[in-house]
Structures are given as C-alpha cells and as structure tokens.
Amino acid sequence: MAKRAFITGITGQDGSYLAELLLLKGYEVHGLIRRASTFNTSRIDHLYVDPHEAEVKLFLHYGDMSDGARMMGLLSQIQPDEVYNLAAQSHVRVSFDEPIHTGNTTGIGSARLLEAVRTIGLGTRFYQASSSEMFGGTPPPQNEETPFYPRSPYGAAKVYSYWMTRNYREAYGMYAVNGILFNHESPRRGATFVTRKITRAVAAILAGKQQDLFLGNLDAVRDWGYAAEYVEGMWRMLQADSSDDYVLATGRAFSVRDFLEFAFDHAGLDWRRHVHFDERYLRPTEVDALVGDASKAKELLDWSASVTSPELAGIMVDADVAALASSDGKWIDKVSLNTWVSTPAWDIQQ
Ligand code: NAP
Ligand code: G4F
C-alpha cells in the first residue's frame, strides 16, 4: 500500500517541492488549498495529471487553517500516514500589519490541525514547519537548544505552534516533530521575500524593463539554503524511529548586501547603480542575524545542505532571466488575461 500524506500549504514554495518529492517516492498526496477568485496553483500545475489519461496520485481539497471542523472532516476522510503542516501567513513584515490573522493561521491553525490528528487517533505522524525566526533576538549560531526570542507577530505565532507540537508529543505520545528551518529560497520563492525581489529585479534590469530597486535593511544577516534540499530533510524527520526537533541550515552567514552582490555580479551588473533605500521596507523590530547549526540533522538524519547562498543566487537569477524571456515581456497579459491557457482543470471537490 502506498503511504498517504496530507500537506497544508501545498501551493506554497515548500509545499510544491514536497509534493514533488513525495510523489516521486510513491506516496498518494493530498493537499489543502484555499478557495481564491484567481488561480493559485501555479507552483503545482506541472504535477497535474488528467484523470482520463493516467492514475491520479495528487488530490486537492478546499479548506483553510482557520476552520478546525474542516480539518477534522478532511483527516477522517483521507486518513493520512503523515501530515506536513506548511500553511502559514509566512511574511514577517506583513505579520506586523496583520498580527491577529497571523496568530490565527500561523499559530492557532497548527493547534486545530494537531487536535484533528489527535482526535482521529490513527497514529498519523505530524510535521510542524517551525522557523529560525523564533530565535529572533538571540545571537547566532542557533541550534535546537538555543532560547527563543521572537521579534515579530509571525515569530511569536511560530513559537506557539512549536510548543503545541512538543506538548502533543509529550502529553499524548504523538509522533510530532518540529523542523526548525532557516531561510530557504528557490526560483519558486514568493516575490516579496528579499532574495526573490532581488533576483527578479536583476532579470528586469538586464531586460531593460526596470532601473531601480528599493530595499530596506541591507545589514541583516541570514543563512540562505535551497528549498528543494530542505523538503528532503522534512521527510527524513518523519521517517526516524522516534520524534524529535531538528534545525536545517547551511551554517553560512551572509548579509542582504552580500546577496545583492552575488545576484548582480552573476548577471554582470553593479548593484550600487540600481539599489536605493526605502524605509517602508524596515520592520518595527528587526532580526539582525540568523545562522544555523544543523549538526544534529547531519548526525541523526544524515541531512546536510549542499547548495551555498552564492550558488543559490545564481540559480534564482538564471531562472528569473529565463522566465522573463519566455513570457515575451508580456508580464501583465500573462498574469491577468492568459492564465486560462496554461492552468489545468484541477478536479477539486466543490
Ligand atoms: P509560502 O510560499 O508563503 O506558502 C505558504 C502556504 O500557506 C501557501 O500554500 C498558502 O496558500 C498557504 N496558506 C496561507 N494561509 C493559509 C490559510 N489561512 N489556510 C490555508 N492555507 C494557507 O511559504 P513557504 O516558504 O513555502 O514556507 C512553508 C512553511 O515553512 C511556512 O509555514 C513558513 O512559515 C515556514 N518556514 C519557511 C521558511 C522559508 O525560508 N521559506 C523558513 C522557516 C519556516 P496560498 O498559495 O493560497 O497563499
Ligand atoms: O526575505 P525576508 O522577508 O525573510 P525573513 O524575514 O528572514 O523571513 C523568512 O525566513 C524565515 C526564516 O528565518 C521564515 F520563517 C519566514 O516565513 C520567511 O520565509 O527578509 C530577510 C531580510 C530581513 O532582515 C529584512 O529586513 O531582508 C531584509 N530586507 C531588506 N530589504 C527586506 C527588504 N526584506 C523584504 N522582504 N523586502 C525588502 O525590501
């Protein structure tokens, strides 16, 4: 029997890579998807299979992290072996604008899902997408023993989810793990996170469509890895003999300024001629430095990151340059008018 997985956040960056990985491993994959007035499946459209032509292994279900009854219903219907809770309002800056919504989805949403898993009582293994943002103000290097000091509503919501996951493990003996992941990026990264904002701008500047790029704090230090590698670590966490918490990171520190250098250099451009400061991109409280120590994951899961931040910047610039070239420069048309041409007919129960 194929294993069955349920992924919340399947339409996001990590959800799309994880769905790919699990399908490759022979899983039947179920994903939670939000009903939206526009198509929101672009990151997983390449996984669509026409049910008339081949056996379908990927199923989508409407739902929302704010709706606990729906989670209960879905889990009893799907009866998954593994649940990966990746859904979140995941943007740190936005969490200052929407602290209550962020708490409700990124925080209490996890409790709704944990409670559904516990109630269904099938021994389902649970993965919680915890974050290095929980370390916030505690200086690096950070590992599984480092105290949390969240510096944003997002970080605080993730700390709540982290402790709820541990509590369900300790109180009910659930197989529940926290993957404490440091920043990981890819060509599928949301366009308003700093790495992708930079690599998209590089492509647009090269194509002569943009001159200026406005950014906030260039001094922030992050440990940027490649998302496609990190989802393998998530899966390994759920295959271990017992449940535990693990940091995934590259262990290398770079500033936003360094990433600018990598991305612009890769395209033969000088970032100083294009980048300007805009205070709107500053945060009320900043996280100055996140650099992870992933030696526990190396030792117990045999997981380590191989793609470095400079390599990642090159991968992302190349992908954005190719994407812009293949769109014939018709960004607006492509997004607003022509999506029906390329969006498959997902059979989401409605
Ligand atoms: P992402 O691209 O922003 O994806 C977030 C996903 O959550 C999307 O599928 C989104 O759906 C879904 N979602 C948001 N609100 C929801 C709601 N109320 N109900 C149901 N679904 C909802 O994030 P990511 O980068 O893939 O990250 C995956 C997870 O890891 C997140 O929990 C994030 O906080 C955490 N994390 C990420 C990083 C990182 O560096 N990427 C590091 C540590 C932890 P739509 O597509 O409809 O918006
Ligand atoms: O790319 P960012 O928005 O990512 P941030 O805040 O580190 O959060 C990401 O990583 C977390 C893991 O540590 C995840 F949990 C979270 O879900 C998300 O994926 O910002 C990175 C740094 C910040 O210090 C920010 O102040 O870049 C700085 N920055 C400078 N200018 C900017 C900008 N960030 C954004 N988004 N936009 C700017 O213009």
Image (cartoon, grey):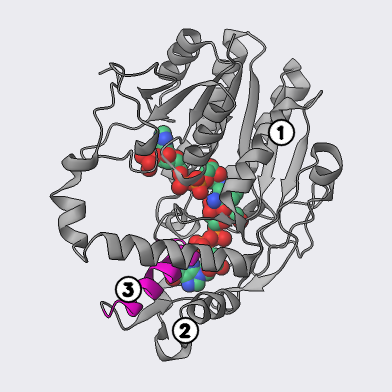
**Is residue 166 rendered to the left or right of residue 185?**
right
> In the shown orientation, is residue 341 left or right of residue 160?
left
**Circle 3/circle 1 CB separation < 8 Å:** no
Whole-number angstrom distance, CA of label 1 to CA of label 2: 39 Å
Residue at left offset 43%, top offset 11% = 73
Residue located 47% across and 46% down the image: 13
* Residue that badge 1 annotates: 236
Q: Secondary structure at mark 3?
A: helix
In three-dimensional space, the C-alpha distance between marks 3 and 1, rounded to whole angstroms, equals: 38 Å
Q: Is residue 27 magenta?
A: no
Quarter of the image with the C terminus is: top left
Q: Callout 1: few (<14), some (14-19), or many (20+) C-alpha neighbours within 10 Å?
A: some
56 lies above or below 326? above
Task: Kindly check if marks 3 and 2 are in contact, taking CB atoms under 8 A apart as contact.
Answer: no
Residue of label 3 = 204
x and y percentages locating residue 202 in the rendered image? 40, 75
Considering the whole magenta stretch, tell me its main secondary structure: helix
Element carrying mark 2 = loop
Q: Is residue 332 above or below residue 24?
A: below
Which amino acid type corresponds to the residue marked 1 in the rendered image?
A: Arg
> Which comes before the other along the chain, label 3 or label 2?
3
Q: Which residues are magenta?
A: 192-208
Q: Quadrant of the N terminus?
A: top right
Residue identifier under label 2: 268
Q: Residue at x 17, y 41 (%)?
A: 341
How much space separates mark 3 and mark 2, taking CA atoms? Answer: 13 Å
